Amino acid sequence: MSANNQSVAILGCGWFGLPLAESLLKQGFIVKGTKRSAAGVDMLRSKSISAMGLDLDQPLSSQQRKALHAFLDVDYLVVNIPPNMRAGRLDYLERVNRLYQVITLHDFKKLIFISTTGVYDSKDAEFDETQASAHSERARILLDAEDLYLNKEETCVLRFAGLVGPKRHPGRFMAGKCDLSGGNCVVNLVHLEDCIGATHTVLQSKTTSPVYNLCSPHHPTRKDFYSQAAVDLQCTPPQFNAQHLPSKVINGHKITEELGFQYRYSNLVDMLKQC
């Protein structure tokens, strides 16, 4: 796909959205992005990204809706609004719905909605894209948000597994902790660069399925992986007890089979050097 004069807006230029924006700039896209703060907007503009402030915690005023409507005059759209539900927030659906009321007025060549593999239950099973369930309030909210955006036929949902990469070295997640359960469980992780690569692949694909999982095909146990990750940082390895927990496996092969995407980090131990 030639990026000449092709425009893309990324709503949410944080840990994933900003490096995605920078990679698309390098490919020749005209890139727009949003940040919540004025300082964030200035930072984006300093990187040649057309920027606007967007805070979804409150309903959008008519002036804000008008500005967003003009901002969304682009070929491609990436919606990357973190749920933040682990922090106790349950207003995610309200926030993405505020966006959708403006987004639905536009047609795009492709709309990518970033979601999470948190829509899969913690069971001893392998999960593909068809096996999401509203097994918890959090999962129900996530699925409702996906369904809202899938009302637009150009939408493709990318469900990211646990995110690792710069400033998110997995060795810090459990280093030094004791008496941890579930050492038998496998890990389901994906590196930032694979998230960016998969997004590029979807943007370049004329036809896609509605949903793709994004998860490394390598699934070592938590005990083996997090112990190695801690050692990699010269930290104290975590200590696991003998209690086993259900071990789910996220299958991220569909995007490789249908779109030809290849995971750069198909071995998570090798990936540690790039975090």
Image (cartoon, rainbow, N blue to C red):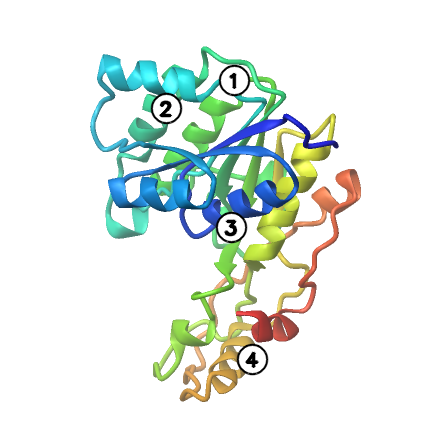
Label 1, secondary structure: give it. Answer: loop
In this rendering, the label closer to the viewer, 2 or 4: 2
Residue 99, which numbered label? 2
Question: x%, y% of residue 244?
Answer: 48, 72
Label 4, secondary structure: give it. Answer: helix
Inter-mark Cα distance, 3 to 2? 22 Å
Toward the viewer: 53 or 121?
A: 53
In this rendering, does residue 37 appear at all? Answer: no
Q: Tell me the kind of residue under disc 2.
A: Leu
Question: x%, y% of residue 225?
Answer: 55, 76
Sort mark 3 into few (<14), some (14-19) or many (20+) by Cα contacts within 10 Å.
some
The image shows a total of numbered marks equal to 4
Residue at (36, 84) in percent of width and height: 176
In this rendering, the label closer to the viewer, 3 or 4: 3
Q: Tell me the kind of residue under disc 4.
A: Asp
In this rendering, the label closer to the viewer, 1 or 4: 1
Instruction: State the residue position of label 3.
Output: 19
In this rendering, the label closer to the viewer, 3 or 1: 3
Instruction: Examine the image and state in which quarter residue 274 appears.
Output: bottom right
Residue at (41, 16) in percent of width and height: 70
| Mark closer to the chain start, 3 or 2 | 3
| Mark closer to the chain start, 3 or 4 | 3
Instruction: State the residue position of label 1.
Output: 151
Q: Tell me the kind of residue under disc 3.
A: Pro
Q: Quick check: 124 left or right of 91? A: right
Residue at (32, 35) in percent of width and height: 92
Q: Is residue 180 above or below residue 39?
A: below
Inter-mark Cα distance, 1 to 4? 42 Å
Image quadrant where one finds the N terminus = top right
Q: Quick check: 108 left or right of 104? A: right
Inter-mark Cα distance, 3 to 4? 30 Å
